Amino acid sequence: MELIIQLGFVAFLLAIGYFFGSAREQSHYKSIIQRQKSMSHLPTRAEKIKDTSPYSEAMLVSGSVVIASDYFKNFVAGIKGFFGGRLTTYETLMDRGRRESILRMKEQALKWGADEILEVRLEMATLDAIGIEMFAYGTAVKKHKV
């Protein structure tokens, strides 16, 4: 009987993790999509530029985000990790982290008045199976006004 109660409690936690985690993830994606549309006019480039003459000012800009994983994602990833294969449950976590950190970097660049962000880079760190930290940085530039 005690085993059934314990299994029921674990199933309850997994269901709550799935329900609230999925709802929060969908809400976050909606926010990301809206903000990406509003900042689509600020271009970013990953490649190194050779001619810096059209730019009058430059500044380092960055954006950082920590996104936690839910019980359900951890449980499913643990099972998949045992058998091997793609951890699709964590792919959305990585995607949200990447997109959010880039948006935060762009927000900082827009506050400064940038026309473009050059040499964008991303860094990622895991936080002991709790979640991830994503860090985006680049060089925000203002173009010469002619």
Image: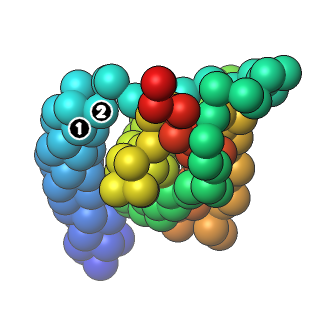
Which one is closest to the eye, mark 2 or mark 1?
2
Real-space CA distance between mark 2 and mark 1, rounded to the nearest whole angstrom: 6 Å
Q: Decide: is 115 above or below 113.
A: above
Do residues under tags 2 and 1 come within 8 Å of each other at their CB atoms? yes
Horizontal side of 136 relative to 103 (left or right) equals right
Q: Decide: is 4 above or below 42.
A: below
Q: Is residue 76 visible?
A: no
The residue beneath circle 2 is 39
Which residue does the image show at 70% across and 50% down from the upper left?
A: 123
The residue beneath circle 1 is 35
| Badge 1: residue crowd in 10 Å (few <14, some 14–19, many ≥20) | some
- Residue 30: percent from left, percent from top: 17, 35
Q: Is residue 120 visible?
A: yes
Residue 97: image tag? none
Q: Name the amino acid type tagged 1.
A: Arg
- Residue 37: percent from left, percent from top: 23, 26
- In this view, the residue in front, 38 or 82, is 38
- Residue 53: percent from left, percent from top: 73, 28
| Badge 2: residue crowd in 10 Å (few <14, some 14–19, many ≥20) | few
Which residue does the image show at 45% across and 50% down from the upper left?
A: 109
Q: Decide: is 84 above or below 73.
A: above
